């Protein structure tokens, strides 16, 4: 399979994943807004921080390393050996769910039964749901490796819809069940590769600490009460909504593309130059797309954070620390977008030895991040978690940029040019940020709905003008997006 065909399939997978994420997030967005009206923020905090951390940690430790290692390389392989390796995720999931479940029940503070009832049952059912999900890991791998887009979209869509419908039903009819509501809804739902898997496991363990570090600090050090944890998690989910909608499908799909097109053990000058050139062009366009998306969220999110929280959750979210949290998170999203693309390429191109060396960097980052999270949270409250995440993300971006620079140093390609914007576009962003900030002062958010609608209309006008400027100045990115939207259709016609 040529690099252009792989690129077309990766683009199709990313666009389908984007559509899938839109459906997912619209459902969960409406669901969370609905639940906030019926359940306490303490229960939301226990579920979204404590129990979800148990679930995500079990899945991450059991499967992430296998996914990264087994997706590397071409589809020409001994599939029986690869699938045998992937089946190890299930027993690993059982081990991690039992061990972490014991930690959650015996070592951590148990919530007050009057505030969050049925906590023990919640721990058991969330751990069980993680094991059940791991049983389908070989099927997920086959769908991802061969880019069976429709199968993946249908399966994951049905899972989310069933979980959401069941959660709403239980909240309406049995609100006194507390944590049972979320727990039952959750429950419905070759040797070279083995060595590479072990390298990625070490890296994944450290990356999990960096990804979920604030939840570990909340859970094990009790720096925030369950109510504050609930508010932080709601703001965190709302702030990362666009990031998960856009960046996550792109990162997952184009990791597969880079891993198939590039060879881990070879320098860029020793590989097929057509593949290297295609990879560089794709990386440059993805960096530009991430930068533009992140800047848009940062600039416009600052002036509309309080309004968004007031509409979404009422005074519980729009008063207090909520708006400051969301504004800070908008800056974090910019770094998150760039890091997702740079690490997507870096992890796909690194050799096993480079992955092992990078693990030492991740270890230092993990330790410093946890300490910094604790200190900043003690100093400035829950905003400290976001500031620590920004520091962590900045260091990771720097490491990835250094790797990309070294990788293409001896070639004529310069994909890091994607991080440069035209002065005209930067001016449009600055002007839009200033206008919307003044608009927030005079029109939002205590002056009634007519003033709010005027604030929204002004923001929409500024957003349209900024995107229009981007369309006119970033012609290379526009061409890339148009081309890749057309590639899948041409491939389908010829197959």
Image: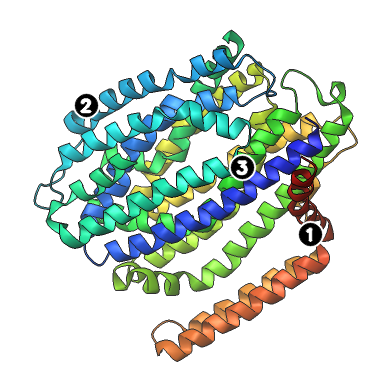
* Label 1 secondary element: helix
444 or 178, nearer to the observer = 178
| Point 34% across, 36% down: residue | 55
264 or 252, nearer to the observer = 252
1 or 2: tag closer to the N-terminus:
2
Residue 154's x, y, as percent?
A: 50, 46
| Placement of 327 over or under 351, stated as above or below | below
Asked where in the image residue 320 lies, by quadrant, the reply is bottom left
Crowdedness near tag 2: few (<14), some (14–19) or many (≥20) residues, C-alpha within 10 Å: some
Residue 292's x, y, as percent?
A: 68, 59
Residue, disc 2? 102
* Label 3 secondary element: helix
Residue 478: numbered disc = 1
Quadrant where the C terminus sits is: top right
Residue 251: numbered disc = 3
Crowdedness near tag 1: few (<14), some (14–19) or many (≥20) residues, C-alpha within 10 Å: some
- Report whether residue 222 is seen: yes
* Gap in angstroms between the C-alphas marked 2 and 3: 34 Å
**Tag 3–tag 1 contact (CB < 8 Å):** no
Crowdedness near tag 3: few (<14), some (14–19) or many (≥20) residues, C-alpha within 10 Å: many
* Gap in angstroms between the C-alphas marked 1 and 2: 52 Å
Residue 318's x, y, as percent?
A: 36, 71
* Gap in angstroms between the C-alphas marked 3 and 1: 19 Å
3 or 1: tag closer to the N-terminus:
3
Residue 435's x, y, as percent?
A: 62, 80
Observer-side mark, 2 or 3, equals 3
């Amino acid at each position: 399979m040529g690099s252009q065909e792989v690129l077309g399939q990766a683009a199709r997978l990313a666009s389908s994943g984007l559509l899938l994420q839109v459906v997912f997030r619209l459902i969960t967005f409406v669901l969370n807004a609905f639940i906030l009206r019926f359940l306490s923020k303490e229960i939301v905090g226990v579920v979204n921080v404590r129990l979800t951390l148990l679930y995500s940690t079990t899945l991450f430790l059991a499967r992430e390393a296998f996914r990264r290692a087994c997706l590397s390389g071409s589809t020409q392989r001994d599939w029986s050996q690869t699938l045998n390796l992937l089946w190890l995720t299930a027993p690993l999931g059982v081990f991690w769910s039992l061990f972490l479940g014991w930690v959650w029940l015996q070592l951590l503070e148990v919530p007050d039964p009057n505030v969050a009832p049925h906590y023990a049952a919640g721990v058991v059912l969330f751990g069980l749901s993680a094991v059940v999900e791991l049983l389908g890991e070989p099927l997920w791998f086959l769908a991802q490796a061969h880019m069976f887009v429709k199968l993946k979209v249908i399966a994951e869509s049905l899972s989310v819809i069933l979980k959401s419908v069941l959660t709403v039903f239980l909240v309406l009819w049995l609100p006194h069940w507390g944590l049972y509501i979320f727990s039952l809804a959750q429950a419905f739902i070759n040797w070279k590769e083995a060595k590479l898997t072990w390298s990625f496991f070490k890296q994944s363990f450290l990356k999990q600490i960096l990804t979920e570090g604030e939840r570990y600090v909340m859970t094990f050090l009790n720096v925030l009460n369950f109510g504050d944890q609930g508010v932080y998690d709601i703001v965190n989910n709302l702030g990362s909504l666009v990031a998960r909608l856009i960046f996550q499908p792109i990162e997952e799909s184009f990791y597969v593309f880079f891993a198939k097109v590039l060879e881990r053990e070879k320098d860029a000058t020793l590989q097929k130059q057509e593949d290297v050139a295609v990879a560089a062009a794709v990386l440059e366009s993805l960096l530009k797309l991430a930068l533009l998306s992140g800047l848009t969220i940062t600039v416009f999110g600052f002036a509309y954070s309080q309004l968004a929280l007031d509409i979404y959750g009422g005074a519980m979210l729009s008063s207090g620390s909520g708006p400051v949290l969301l504004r800070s998170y908008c800056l974090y999203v910019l770094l998150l977008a760039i890091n997702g693309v740079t690490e997507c390429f870096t992890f796909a191109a690194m050799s096993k030895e480079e992955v092992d060396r990078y693990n030492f960097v991740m270890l230092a980052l993990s330790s410093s991040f946890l300490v910094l999270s604790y200190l900043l949270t003690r100093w400035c409250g829950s905003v400290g978690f976001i500031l620590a995440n920004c520091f962590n993300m900045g260091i990771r971006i720097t490491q990835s940029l250094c790797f990309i620079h070294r990788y293409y140093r001896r070639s004529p390609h310069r994909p890091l040019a994607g991080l440069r914007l035209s002065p005209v576009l930067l001016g449009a962003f600055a002007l839009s940020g200033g206008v919307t900030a003044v608009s927030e002062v005079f029109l939002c958010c205590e002056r009634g709905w007519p003033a709010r609608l005027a604030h929204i209309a002004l923001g929409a006008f500024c957003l349209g003008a900024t995107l229009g400027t981007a369309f006119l100045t970033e012609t290379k990115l526009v061409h890339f997006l148009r081309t890749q939207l057309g590639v899948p259709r041409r491939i389908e016609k010829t197959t």
